[in-house]
Amino acid sequence: MAITDNVLTSRSRLSATPAEVYRALTDPEVLRSWLAEHVDVSIPDGRFAFWGRGTPEREPGRQRLLEVEDDRRLKLSWQLDGGETTTELVLEADEPGNTVLTLTQTGVPSWAEMSPSADIRVSIVLFWGVAVANLADHIEGREPVPLCDFGPDRSAEATASITIAAPPETVFPSLLEPKQLERWGGWDAEVEPRVGGTFVLNSGSEPGKILELDFPRALTYTVVPGQVVHWELSGSEGRTYLSMVHSGFDDPAAAAQQEVGWVSALLELRRLHELGPAWRPVSLEFSIA
């Protein structure tokens, strides 16, 4: 598909000052932990590039630094899908010790085009979702999750795993109860919590069915014909190792996109359980217009 006029706008609240966030956006070593496998960044020399297995269109040389304001703004050119797009990151002080990061990305698909596909423009929207979530975790002292693989030789399954500082008995209901699914994933879920019961993440979509329900160790359900999501939980010392496999994709690119979406959601699930009553979602806005 050709580059479009649609713009992604992502606004996120980060628990650090603008100067601290700016350092996380411009320090090469830090960027390798949350953004990309490889970076070539030197603001004084006018360089800002990143690439690798976790970056859509994984080759080097696609980004170019256009404008910079210390501790406040970065603007990049990103060659994407045969055309030039721009990425802008703007930092504004929020309540004491916090920053609102506004990220805009041009050339993205409309929401109607956002189903998993081979379209690299879909991947870029999902990439920024998980990148900002990873940045928030880095700032709050959590281990960033491994980068997803956008390579053509990857598996046609979406997989994700995360360790949460809460026991399985506490985490498991978050995968099953509609009010909790709405809190951490934003879904309008409908669930009948029994084997054979309905499982729908978004109201109005084709209903799935629960195939396995073993509290608090395993949950398996269908999402669309031919696609199955399987969760496994194991606990130790008050912590949960949570893993997910979403199978049934025909295209590795579609599986990669679904994987990135799951990882972004799981980062918020981890924050929800580890912050408890102090939890607030990182995302303030995630829109395309």
Image: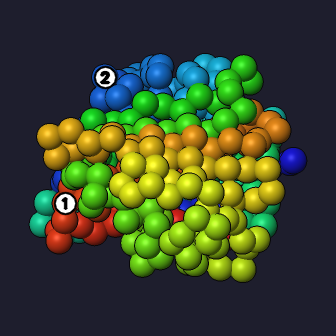
Left or right: where 195 falls relative to 232: right
The mark found on residue 275 in the picture is 1
Residues at badges 1 and 2 in contact (C-beta under 8 Å)? no
Label 2 packing within 10 angstroms: few (<14), some (14-19), many (20+): few
Mark 1 belongs to which amino acid? Answer: Leu
Mark 2 belongs to which amino acid? Answer: Glu
Asked whether 21 or 187 is in front, the reply is: 187
Q: Residue at x 69, y 60 (%)?
A: 223
Determine whether 139 is above or below 38 in the image. Answer: below
Q: Residue pushed farthest right?
A: 1
Left or right: where 276 falls relative to 37: left
Left or right: where 24 falls relative to 41: left
Asked whether 260 or 9 is in front, the reply is: 260
Determine whether 203 is above or below 122 in the image. Answer: below
Numbered disc 1: secondary structure:
helix
Label 1 packing within 10 angstroms: few (<14), some (14-19), many (20+): few
Determine whether 142 is above or below 63 in the image. Answer: below
Q: Which residue is drawn at 35% across and 29% down?
A: 33
- Dividing the picture into quadrants, the one containing residue 155 is top right
Quarter occupied by the C terminus? bottom right
Question: Residue 191: x and y, percent?
Answer: 55, 75
The mark found on residue 29 in the picture is 2
Question: Residue 282: x and y, percent?
Answer: 35, 62
Q: Alpha carbon of mark 1 to alpha carbon of mark 2: how far?
A: 27 Å
